[in-house]
């Protein structure tokens, strides 16, 4: 059975105007056939937050919405809650306190049922706290700031739906560069993934040339930032108290909507070249005119006046094309062959 | 004539308690033999700010402090101001508005006299605005934020004391990751250098194996962050309005105090291994004990009781040594051979 898609949402997804992310979630869950389980455990609110998402998902066309709301580890052994997860096509974990959520569900039948839903192909989404818990290693809490400093954050274990990663959210809005860098400096086998507000990392398993690749695409208003510390040099094992950390050689990827990143090869899937239709038309016109000019020259019929007039007709509007032409070739080593199957239908 | 050292200070250098950076500047300028020219043009204050630095530099042991305060481009042609710069051993440019500073001095005799001072070996320092102006390309102004977005900042031309770079300051405190990334995404031939408050990047030209290398060392409480976009893939040439930018493959270096970075090869100079004296003593003791044990075994004299007692005596305190052993080898390609001459006397 193929693993289902994951929606890792950076918090504050638009609920009023541009509901791109919530709509994508409902569509992936099956639209009118969707049966969505909402887990509001991270939140200090209970029925209220479920009511909001119930209304949002139904207005986006979802068939059914049920609540799965364990409030302690005992609840997380309730077979009735497990049954709701076993029969759903989508799971949505709300924001709140991710350490509350992980403390209550990780390593319980409810937690295992979320993992099982992902492994049988259901879509699993979470926003803010519900995003953090999806990674193998979870930011428990910490402070903001750009420069990584020793002890600025704590790591706990997450649900592990995405292996070898640590996810942070509200990334731009709460300035969490430093704490995510601190974590990957201490654990260079992890990939750090920071998701901005009203932005989703959509993670899907896709077969490319017979191999399973985990592809990440981006949806929404902000960006997804990836820190790859594989080639890092650091002093994180000996920096004292709250000293700034040495973290040299981290590879950084900032990915806005429309980007596609291969988590398996840790590289950008190069964007397809976009042809400007106006430019193509101009080139075609200029080309046909130049062919006419070549014929005239061959026939000895190219007076200076004719050349000037022709040049005026065939003038191509100047445009800064260098970057257009060069950009896709700038990072040949980083860019793998495009996968045969795209990860993002958008 | 060798080029003088540059002190690129991220603003808010400690003036009351730990005056490491200001002291280093005065020492580099010659201490009692120093003749320091203070350029307060970026500031909206005039004599007041010169008085503050005059008192600070004199209390740090500087022989003489003079003001060079052009308030318009006409002033910047004043031979008396140029003469003060021509006879100084150190130049200090204060904080304020870097676009005011560059508009008034760049391309004038005063601006050329600052460049000449650097090229004849004088130390040139600047804090905040006075830091920004030292690079070839200067952040004119812009907004904060972690995620790089189109149009979030403007670039103007700086004094060009450091080639092919753009310097930003108050980097952690004002969250300027995004705007520095935007600039290098649009200009991938530049190295982006972000300096935290109360932190200095000390840039010195050092001959290594007969070649001139530009080395950057770090002094102070925060870190210096370097973005190397040489292998970048970006959409910065076509991103619309204020859209987040694609910036994939940027190499990131966060450098705290004590780090040494080669701007010429764009790589970290690997830190020297530090041996923990306690651990060395323990290993020596354990080694001599183990040699005794080997002799006993060879002599058939190793009873279980003798082995237990010996093990208790030779017990090495457990310590997480893996990172110690591995870290210097993590990034062999990024790490050049250590230069024969260190760039930082500290």
Image: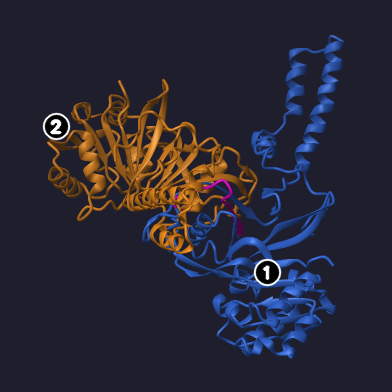
Chain colours: A orange, B blue
Q: Residue at x 50, y 37 (%)?
A: A335
Numbered disc in front, either 2 or 1: 2
Q: Which residues are magenta?
A: B223-235
Give x and y (percent) for residue B336: 73, 43
Task: Find out whether residue B225 is within the magenta segment.
Answer: yes
Q: Which residue is mark 1?
A: B18
Give x and y (percent) for residue A328: 48, 43
Label 1 marks which chain's residue? B
Q: Outermost residue, front direction?
A: A300
| Residue B30 visible in the displayed image | yes
Dot 2 falls on a residue whose secondary structure is: helix
Task: Find out whether residue B236 is within the magenta segment.
Answer: no
The image quadrant where one finds the N terminus of chain B is bottom right
Mark 2 to mark 1 CA distance (whole Å):
66 Å
Q: Which residue is mark 2?
A: A33
Q: Residue at x 73, y 57 (%)?
A: B214
Binning the other alpha carbons within 10 Å of mark 2 as few (below 14), some (14 to 19) or many (20 upward) gives some
Dot 1 falls on a residue whose secondary structure is: loop
């Amino acid at each position: 059975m193929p693993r289902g898609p994951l929606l890792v949402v950076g918090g504050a997804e638009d609920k009023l105007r541009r509901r791109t992310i919530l709509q994508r979630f409902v569509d992936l869950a099956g639209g009118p056939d969707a049966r969505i389980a909402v887990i509001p455990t991270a939140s200090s609110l209970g029925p209220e937050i479920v009511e909001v998402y119930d209304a949002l998902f139904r207005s986006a066309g979802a068939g059914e919405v049920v609540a799965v709301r364990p409030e302690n580890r005992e609840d997380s052994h309730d077979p009735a809650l497990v049954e709701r997860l076993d029969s759903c096509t989508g799971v949505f974990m709300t924001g709140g306190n991710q350490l509350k959520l992980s403390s209550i569900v990780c390593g319980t039948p409810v937690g295992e049922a979320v993992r099982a839903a992902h492994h049988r192909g259901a879509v699993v989404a979470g926003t803010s706290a519900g995003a953090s818990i999806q990674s193998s290693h979870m930011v428990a809490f910490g402070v903001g700031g750009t420069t990584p400093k020793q002890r600025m954050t704590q790591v706990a274990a997450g649900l592990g739906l995405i292996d070898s990663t640590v996810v942070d959210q509200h990334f731009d809005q709460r300035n969490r560069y430093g704490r995510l860098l601190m974590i990957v400096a201490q654990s260079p086998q992890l990939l750090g993934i920071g998701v901005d507000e009203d932005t989703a990392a959509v993670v899907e398993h896709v077969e490319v040339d017979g191999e399973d690749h985990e592809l990440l695409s981006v949806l929404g208003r902000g960006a997804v930032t990836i820190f790859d510390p594989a080639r890092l040099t650091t002093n994180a094992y000996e920096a004292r108290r709250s000293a700034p950390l040495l973290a040299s050689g981290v590879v950084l990827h900032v990915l806005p909507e429309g980007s596609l990143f291969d988590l398996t090869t840790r590289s950008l899937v190069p964007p397809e070249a976009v042809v400007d239709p106006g430019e193509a038309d101009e080139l075609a016109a200029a080309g046909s005119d130049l062919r006419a000019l070549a014929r005239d020259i061959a026939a000895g019929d190219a007076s200076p006046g004719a050349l000037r007039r022709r040049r005026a007709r065939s003038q191509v509007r100047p445009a800064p094309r260098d970057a257009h032409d060069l950009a896709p070739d700038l990072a040949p080593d980083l860019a793998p062959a495009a996968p045969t199957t795209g990860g993002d239908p958008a």
